[in-house]
Image (cartoon, grey):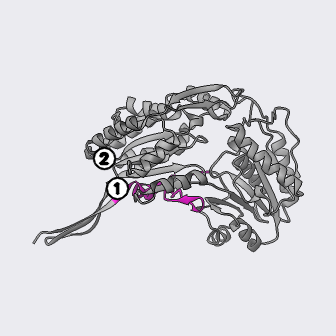
Amino acid sequence: MTTLQCISPIDSSVFAERTCATAPEAGAMIARARAAQKAWAARPLEDRVALVRAGVAALGAMGDEVVTEIARMMGRPVRYGGEFGGVNERASYMADIAAEALAPIVAEDSASFERRIEREPHGLVLVIAPWNYPYLTAINTVAPALIAGNAVILKHATQTLLAGERMVAAFTSAGVPAEVFQNIFLDHTTTEDLLAAKAFDFVNFTGSVAAGRRIERAAAGTFTPLGLELGGKDPGYVMEDADLDAAVETLIDGAMFNSGQCCCGIERIYVHESLFDAFVEKAVALVKGYKLGDPLDPDTTIGPMANARFAAQVRAQIDAAVAAGATAHIPTFAADDVGCYLTPQILTGVDHSMEVMREESFGPVVGIMPVSSDAEAISLMNDSPYGLTAALWTTDAARAAVIGAQIDTGTVFMNRCDYLDPALCWTGCKDTGRGAALSVLGFHALTRPKSYHLKKA
């Protein structure tokens, strides 16, 4: 019997622990979900929408308790509040568009024929959620999956061990049937065995490329559809006509917020050579003003990384870059403990021979390079195995569109970054993964088309 432990990055204490389900226990949960799913899907869409909205509201009502819990589990400072604003925005948008997104596509409705395409739920959806934004990431799939008529089993990351329990408790307290939305604790082996046995009808995973590959291998040959949001190395490009202050403030926040532990966080910045020195000067001054410390302290602006091994990886990238000639601009903060508490860092003198500019960091470090042209910037932005988002800074929307069309990425931003718009498809390319979340396409991913060709006469 495997026990999962959430080790708090605040003080390395065991904050929570739970026992993993055995294979028979997991099988029983799956059987209950499957038995309840048909009746759930048969309920009127407006009922499912109302219950999901109520579940989201119940989650939001947990308030400060959840905020403190997140800080203890993964280190985000309490000053930033919880994730309810984004959770509510995403779930509400998907609820608002559900009737239209799930409506039949009618090809003909005549005296002779009725021809239409319906959207039918897959059945049982497994959501494997990450720790960095434990509620925001999970809601992307949980809300539309339930609205579309699926049953959902949620497996959350060990680092945010209690988030799945809280989410399920909120939704069931609001009236979502307990069998339709369940939380499960699983070890990797049992998870892979269930995938190989085709226990689920759709699997959504957010996490590392390595873990995504394990999921693909486990599900190989089962034809189970997968939604995979994996690594990222998102670039920002600051053109010569950009609003410099806005670019610095937004891109550096996009690189450092949540201690850099964001799927679409900015990990590399290319600045037109005419603005490079000024950009770096302002960025360094901004980061030097951060306060690294206990995330429970309301004065803390940047907390510890979620796990010491994550911080060790970022430190190794920084050290290797400096050894290869890069310049680190931020002196070591007093709270840096060579463990989870890591000084946020800005690097210049970097190039693409360095791991910090090519491989995912997922921590509070960003490399900044000067460029002389759009062509050079495009080449560098595309020189990556990942493709989630890219942020372009210019006053010329037409220019941004032309450049955006040449970037291998899932989302192109102009004059903003690190944001997920629920009206737009959240997707990536290359090693960032495959599939679609949110928007109308998110509903399409969580349902399958079913055609009706009815000859009347």
Element at label 2: helix
Q: Is residue 428 above or below residue 338?
A: below
Q: Is residue 191 magenta?
A: no
Q: Is residue 15 above or below residue 272?
A: above
Q: Nearer the viewer, residue 211 or 71?
A: 211
Q: Is residue 446 magenta?
A: yes
Q: Is residue 11 above or below residue 91?
A: above
Mark 1–mark 2 Cα distance, whole angstroms, equals 9 Å
Mark 2, residues whose alpha carbon is within 10 Å: few (<14), some, or many (≥20)? some
Question: Which callout, 1 or 2, points at the residue further toward the start of the chain?
Answer: 2
What percent of the width, then of the height, locates residue 43? 26, 43
* Magenta segment: 419-448
The amino acid on which the numbered mark 1 sits, given as a three-letter code, is: Leu
Horizontal side of 125 relative to 89 (left or right) equals left
Residue where numbered disc 1 is placed: 102
The amino acid on which the numbered mark 2 sits, given as a three-letter code, is: Leu
The answer to whether marks 1 and 2 mark residues whose Cβ atoms lie closer than 8 Å is yes
What percent of the width, then of the height, locates residue 206? 55, 49
What percent of the width, then of the height, locates residue 48? 33, 42
**Residue at image x 55%, y 27%?**
17
Residue where numbered disc 2 is placed: 45
**Residue at image x 59%, y 28%?**
69
